[in-house]
Image: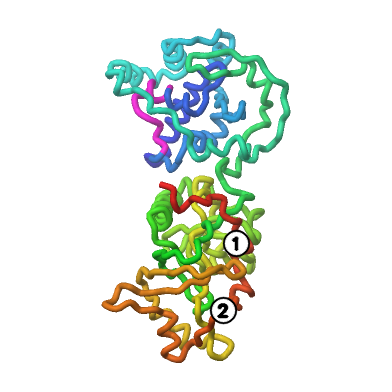
């Protein structure tokens, strides 16, 4: 058995013991607090590939029952053969307000905790003080989404009593929430199932922006990313985090995209050359392959179904970073762009950070002028294309034919709900 598997098995025993000792159950934040006080160190979430306590316990359906309660969740132990007797004894006891009672019950439930409890109690109070409670990305969405529970149960209000941490807990939680009301075993509670990404807010006409051209099909059909602290910086941070998280075997196996979710419009993430990208399924090619649209770069790519994973809620907040664009002020000389014009445009854009001057939006596509300021003299790309015979100057912007035929962002991504996103810290 690997060290990680051993750690998980020991953790299951410890959590079952703590939760059995808590007659009314514990909130995720309270469980973190009690574990830290008993063991002397925080829950090993990152060591096991989890981002939150709720995500961790959702992966232990044989140990923990997750019960919705007043916009949050209460965690209760599922006793095994070795702890059923202890659970029955605890159920007959009165709730206690003291930490001493919690510790005593936990020691009875699991003798293996006793040495660690002694060490924790001998340490200074500051060494075991619980961190300030904070809402995880998973918990923030709990009230709105209910995390796709297997059943919806409408129960009458139950009587509650105050316990040591001030949390109002039901006297008979088991009766209030039937045993069948548990998280779906094959669907992680923080997996995105039927939601869409939002677009970045529209840019004002005449504003100057630093941009990176991420994909080029022609001067009338390309994608840019904004190069600001609040966009490209957050994208890189998210991708590094996704690479770390989804490369963990436990998480990768847990978030495999089920066959029922493999359909056009499904938001997911996909691994390409070791990196994980947010993507939307555009079409199903066959039993093994699908075509996906990479929402942050603009490219359509054929990938294996086996490389698709459910996207976690925390990666839904950042708007899609790819912006469909067309070069302003020019049009092809002969109806469509020649391959030479497209190649020249790619060479002019290169991998440099360019300055974009926003002109207007035409049918949802941003038309802007591009200027390369990395050279001794500024290079206005539309003017170069015109001077070299690849484009004709025009007074009015012509709608992009390529984006009229297919604009995945218009199909699958919602309008921005964060009008001030670019000004956020």
Q: Which percent across, then down, holds residue 139?
A: 53, 36
The tag earlier along the polypeptide, 1 or 2, is 1
Q: Which percent across, then down, holds residue 69?
A: 61, 26
Q: Secondary structure at mark 1?
A: strand
Looking at the picture, does residue 45 appear above or below residue 156? below
The magenta stretch spans residue 26: no
Q: Secondary structure at mark 2?
A: loop
Label 1 to label 2, Cα distance in Å? 35 Å
In the image shown, does 331 or 162 lie closer to the viewer?
Answer: 331
From this viewpoint, is residue 243 visible?
A: no
Where residue 10 sits, quadrant-wise, is top left
Horizontally, is 398 left or right of 386 in the view?
A: right
In the image shown, does 177 or 6 lie closer to the viewer?
Answer: 177
What residue is disc 1 on? 281
Looking at the picture, does residue 227 appear above or below residue 310? below
Looking at the picture, does residue 362 appear above or below residue 377? above
Count all numbered tags in the image, as a single digit: 2
What residue is disc 2 on? 396
**CB under 8 Å between discs 1 and 2:** no
From this viewpoint, is residue 215 visible?
A: yes
Point out the stretch of residues depicted in magenta.
34-45
Residue at (61% x, 18% y) in the render: 170
Any mark on residue 56, and which?
none
Horizontally, is 375 left or right of 167 in the view?
A: left
Closer to the camera: disc 1 or disc 2? Answer: 2
Where residue 152 sits, quadrant-wise, is top right
Assess disc 1: are there few (<14), some (14-19) or many (≥20) residues with their C-alpha within 10 Å of its C-alpha: many
> In which quadrant is the N terminus drawn?
top left
């Amino acid at each position: 058995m690997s060290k990680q598997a051993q750690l998980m098995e020991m953790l299951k025993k410890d959590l079952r013991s703590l939760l059995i000792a808590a007659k009314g159950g514990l909130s995720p934040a309270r469980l973190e607090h009690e574990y830290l006080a008993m063991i002397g160190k925080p829950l090993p979430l990152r060591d096991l590939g989890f981002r939150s306590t709720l995500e961790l316990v959702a992966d232990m359906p044989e140990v923990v029952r997750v019960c919705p309660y007043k916009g949050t969740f209460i965690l209760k132990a599922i006793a095994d053969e070795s702890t059923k007797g202890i659970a029955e004894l605890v159920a007959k006891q009165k709730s206690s307000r003291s930490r001493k009672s919690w510790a005593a019950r936990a020691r009875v439930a699991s003798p293996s905790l006793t040495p660690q409890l002694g060490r924790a109690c001998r340490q200074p109070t500051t060494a075991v003080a619980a961190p300030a409670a904070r809402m995880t990305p998973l918990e923030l969405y709990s009230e709105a989404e209910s995390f796709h529970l297997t059943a919806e149960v409408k129960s009458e209000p139950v009587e509650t009593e105050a316990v040591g941490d001030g949390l109002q807990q039901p006297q008979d939680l088991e009766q209030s929430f039937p045993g069948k009301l548990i998280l779906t075993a094959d669907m992680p509670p923080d997996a995105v199932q039927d939601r869409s990404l939002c677009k970045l807010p529209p840019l004002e006409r005449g504003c100057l922006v630093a941009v990176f051209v991420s994909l080029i099909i022609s001067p009338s059909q390309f994608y840019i990313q904004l190069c600001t602290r609040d966009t490209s910086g957050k994208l890189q941070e998210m991708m590094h985090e996704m690479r770390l998280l989804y490369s963990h075997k436990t998480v990768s196996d847990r978030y495999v995209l089920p066959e029922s979710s493999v359909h056009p419009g499904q938001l997911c993430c996909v691994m390409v050359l070791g990196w994980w990208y947010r993507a939307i399924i555009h079409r199903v090619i066959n039993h093994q392959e699908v075509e996906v649209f990479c929402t942050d770069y603009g490219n359509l790519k054929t990938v294996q179904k086996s490389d698709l994973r459910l996207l976690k809620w925390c990666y839904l907040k950042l708007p899609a970073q790819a912006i469909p664009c067309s070069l302003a002020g020019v049009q092809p000389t002969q109806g469509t762009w020649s391959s030479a014009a497209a190649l020249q445009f790619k060479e002019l854009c290169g991998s440099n950070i360019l300055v974009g001057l926003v002109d207007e939006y035409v049918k949802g596509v941003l038309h802007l002028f591009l200027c390369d300021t990395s050279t001794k003299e500024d290079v206005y790309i539309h003017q170069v294309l015109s001077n070299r015979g690849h484009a004709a100057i025009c007074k009015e912007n012509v709608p992009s034919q390529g984006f009229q035929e297919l604009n995945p962002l218009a199909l699958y991504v919602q309008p921005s709900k964060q009008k001030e996103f670019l000004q956020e810290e």
